[in-house]
Amino acid sequence: MSFTFSETVLDELAEQLSVRGYHVFDSEIPHDVCQALLTKMGVESDGFKHAAIGRGAGQQHQASIRGDKILWLTPECDTDNLYLDLMSQLRLAINRRLYLGLNEFESHYAIYQPGQYYQKHIDSLKGSQNRILTSVLFLNPNWQAEDQGELLIYDEQDQLIETISPTFGKWVVFLSEVFPHEVSATNVDRFSIAGWFRVSNSQHGY
Ligand code: OGA
Ligand code: MN
C-alpha cells in the first residue's frame, strides 16, 4: 500500500495554505489506506478513551465541550504507519515549499457517537509555536446529509466559511492558529483522524 503524493497535489496544498490558509481534498488519500484505518477503528474501539480538555493537572473530561473518544496513532502499529508515512511526506514537502520547520506530527483517531459534538475551538494558541497545521481525515462510508456531524470552519472574524461533510476520504488541512472550527452534533457514529504538525521547542534549544 505504499503511496507517494504527486508533486502537483503538494504544490496545490502549499499554494492554498499560503493564499487562504486551508485546503480541502475530496479523495487524495488512497481508498485502501482509508479502509484499513477505518477497519482498525472498528477492531480497536474498546481501546478508545474520552478526550481530556486542557493540559497537565488541569486536564479533565468535559463531554459538554467535546464528546468524542480517541486513540492516538503510534509508529508501532503497521496500520497507523500507513497514515503517519503520508503525513511525514506532507510535512517534508510543506517544509520545502513554505519553510515552516515542522518537525513533529501527532494524531488521534476519534469516534463521535450519536448526539456528540466538539464545540467551537482553536487548536493552538497564537504564538505558542505548538500546533502549526491541523489535518483532519474523515472516514464515514455512505455519509448522508441527515447524519450531520459536519466540520464547520470559521474565519478570524468568526464568520462561517466552510461546512465540510465528513465523507469517507475527505481530508482538510488548515493553519491551526487561525481558524476556529467545530464538529456539529452527529446522528450516527462518526469516524475521523485529527492530527497536528508541530514545531517542537526543544529543537530551538529552549
Ligand atoms: C479536534 C477536531 C475535528 C474532527 O480534534 O481538534 O477539531 O472532525 N476534530 O475530528
Ligand atoms: Mn480542532
Image (spheres, grey):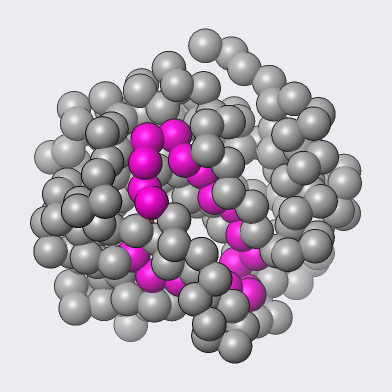
Asked if residue 112 can be seen in this view, the reply is no
Instruction: Tell me: residue 159, above or below residue 161.
Output: below
Image location (x, y in percent) of residue 117: 24, 66
Residue under the image location 69 percent in, 26 percent down: 5
Q: From the viewer's perspective, is 76 left or right of 22? A: left
Q: From the viewer's perspective, is 35 left or right of 94? A: left
Residue under the image location 26 percent in, 34 percent down: 142
Image location (x, y in percent) of residue 154: 52, 75
Image location (x, y in percent) of residue 169: 44, 34
Q: Name the one closer to the observer, 106 or 94.
A: 94
Instruction: Tell me: residue 39, above or below residue 153.
Output: above
Q: Residue 201: name its quadrant.
A: bottom right
Q: Residue 64: name its quadrant.
A: bottom left
Q: Is residue 181 magenta?
A: yes
Instruction: Tell me: residue 71, above or below residue 154.
Output: above
Image location (x, y in percent) of residue 105: 59, 48
Q: Is residue 191 magenta?
A: no
Task: Look at the image and give the residue range highlighted in magenta.
Answer: 165-183
Give the quadrant of the C terminus: bottom right
Query: Which residue ends up furthest to the top in the rendered image?
Result: 1
Query: Which residue ends up furthest to the front in the rendered image?
Result: 145
Residue under the image location 75 percent in, 25 percent down: 6
